[in-house]
Image (spheres, rainbow, N blue to C red):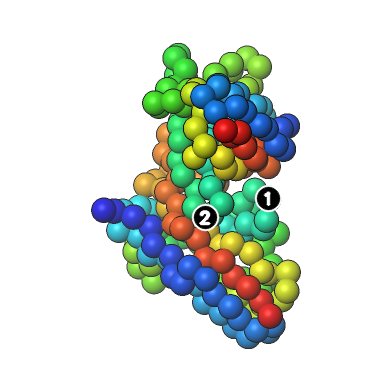
Amino acid sequence: AQKITQTQPGMFVQEKEAVTLDCTYDTSDPSYGLFWYKQPSSGEMIFLIYQGSYDQQNATEGRYSLNFQKARKSANLVISASQLGDSAMYFCAMRSNTGNQFYFGTGTSLTVIP
Amino acid sequence: DAMVIQNPRYQVTQFGKPVTLSCSQTLNHNVMYWYQQKSSQAPKLLFHYYDKDFNNEADTPDNFQSRRPNTSFCFLDIRSPGLGDAAMYLCATSPTSGAAYEQYFGPGTRLTVT
């Protein structure tokens, strides 16, 4: 069975500082993808970053980077230079190479303080 | 721009009165998903289609039905809405199966049941 765990219900960060949002996962599939989505109060889910299980390097997309530690089954999101617009819910998700389902964590609510 | 469109953005229905939510996509993706999301929770997958192949989640109530008449459109029918069905309903697409493919979300329909 696939499972995603996000242990931080809420996080606060000072504007312009970096913040790490934790995500651990459990799967027996050898091939899988890990995703982070941002959901502002408007409700739309916005794709941020992707990491493949066989990727040797950590993914980066602008201010977002993914700290992937395969042996520990963790895929933490790092947001550098936080901005007020980063305040939102953040979901970690996983998709295996077989099947079409995405498995979501319970999310972390991030608040950026001016 | 290619996108996922959901109509309406806000829907109010009466207890027990059938309601249909619609989703369309211009991405020509094979996979379409319907999620239910309640406040401060992760999206919950209701069902998904791969082309015309329908996949129902085991815990999706019978009250929820879906139709996909063609590649572009997918509908969510709630036959007899209860107060507990008030939620955000998210439609998403994905190009095909495989761990590397992300989901593309629509803006969601917020359903209120009175």
The disc label shown at residue B41, or none: 1
Q: Position of residue A3 (x, y in %)?
A: 67, 36
Bin the neighbour count of mark 2 within 10 Å (Cα to Cα): few under 14, some 14-19, many 20 and up: few
Density class for disc 1 (Cα within 10 Å; few <14, some 14-19, many ≥20) is: some
Quadrant where the N terminus of chain A is found in the figure? top right
Picture layout, residue B8 above or below residue A26: below
- Subunit ID for the residue under disc 2: A
Residue drawn where x is 39% and y is 62% of the image = B5
Residue B24 falls left or right of residue A79? left
Farthest residue in the left direction?
Answer: B1
**Which residue sits furthest front?**
A114
| Residue at disc 2, secondary structure | loop
Which picture quadrant has residue A56? Answer: top left
Residue B4 on image: x %, y %: 38, 57
In x, y percent, where is residue B101? 42, 39
Residue at 66% over, 31% down: A12
Say which chain tag 1 marks: B
Q: Is residue B74 visible?
A: no
Residue at 68%, 50% (x, y): give it.
B41
Q: Quadrant of the C terminus of chain A?
A: top right
Residue that carries the numbered disc 2 in the rendered image: A42
Q: Residue at x 53, y 47 (%)?
A: A40
Amino acid on which disc 1 is placed: Gln
Q: Amino acid at mark 2?
A: Ser
Q: Single out the mark in the foreground, 1 or 2.
A: 2
- Classify mark 1: helix, strand or loop: loop
Q: Position of residue B60 (x, y in %)?
A: 66, 62
Image check: B4 left or right of A104? left
Q: Which mark is residue A101?
A: none
